[in-house]
Amino acid sequence: MKNIYGRLGSVLAMSALLVAGCSSGVDGSDSTAPESGSAAPGEVSGNITVFAAASLKATFTQLGTMFEAAHPGTDVAFNFAGSSDLVAQLTQGAPGDVFASADIANMTKALDANLISGEPENFATNTLIIVTPPGNPKGIASFADLADTDNKVVICAPQVPCGAATTKVEKTTGVDITPVSEESSVTDVLGKVTSGQADAGLVYVTDASGAGEKVTSVAFEESSGAVNTYPIAVLSDSGNSAAAKAFEALVMSEEGQKILADAGFTAP
C-alpha cells in the first residue's frame, strides 16, 4: 500500500526548495502541477479496479458513476464474477484495488491469503428466492418443489455464495435438489431461467427484482436461515489506496446504502 503521509513529507520538502525561485502561491494556481496520475494528499484521482460479486453489478455500476462524478479525473473499472472466482483470480496475481464479496467465507479466504489491507466492512445482506419463467408454468410453490425431478432446476455451485446458501437450506430442510446444472455465478442461474433453459432457479432477491417481468418470483420461508452478508475491503496491493478507500467509503455512506436498499439489499 502506498504511504500518503510519506508523500506529504516529500511534497513539503520540494515546496521549500522552490519558494525562492517561484512566484506561485499555495492555492494550486502555479505551473508546477503534480505529475499526471498523481494527487496531493487527501485528494482522490486516478484509476481503480473493483472486484465485486456478480450480484452487485447493477448497484456497483451505479455507484461507480456516482464516484466518478464526485471525483473528476477518476475512472472505476469493474470485474464482476462469482466471489470464489474473484478470490482465485486475486490469489493468482490479478491486479485490483477493492474486493466486495457476496459472503464472509470468501473474504476470509482473501484475508488468509494476505490480499486485504485493514479490516473488511460488512455493507449489505441478501436472501435467496426462487425464480421461474413468467407465469410460473410448472406451478412451483415451495422449496420442496425444487426436489421434483420433473422440474429442471438450476442452482449455484457450492463454492459460490449463493450455492453455499442453497446447500445450507437443503441441509436444514432435508430437501435434496438434483439440479440440471450448477453455475459459477448467480447471474448465470438467472440467465438460464430467463432464457427458458430451466423451470426454476435459486437466485438472490436483488437479482429477481432486477429481472422484473422476465421472471416470476416465489418466496420461501426457509430462506431466512441462509442470509448472506456482503463485506468490502481495500486490497493490500492496491496501486491507488486513497481512491480505493474513498470508494469503500461511498459504499458505506448514506447515499451508497440507499442505492443498495433500493435494489433490495438489506442492512448487515
Image: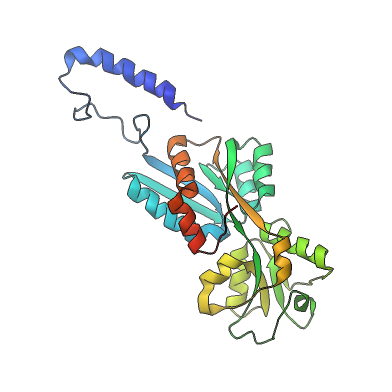
Relative to 96, is 4 above or below? above
Of 127 and 88, nearer the camera is: 127
Q: Residue at x 54, y 70 (%)?
A: 209
Counting the numbered discs, the total is 0
Q: Residue at x 57, y 71 (%)?
A: 208
Relative to 19, is 4 above or below? below
Tell me if residue 98 can be seen. Answer: yes
Left/right of residue 170 with respect to residue 71 in the rendered view: right
Q: Residue at x 61, y 37 (%)?
A: 115
Relative to 113, is 161 above or below? below
Where is residue 191 drawn, in percent x and y?
Answer: 58, 72
Tell me if residue 157 can be seen. Answer: no
Where is residue 153 drawn, in percent x and y?
Answer: 71, 75
Of 81 and 67, nearer the camera is: 67
Where is residue 181 drawn, in percent x and y?
Answer: 71, 70
For the view shown, which residue lies furthest in the left direction?
Answer: 23
Left/right of residue 157 with respect to residue 75 in the rendered view: right
Quadrant location of residue 192?
Answer: bottom right
| Coloration mode | rainbow
Where is residue 184 drawn, in percent x and y?
Answer: 65, 61
Q: Residue at x 36, y 49 (%)?
A: 68
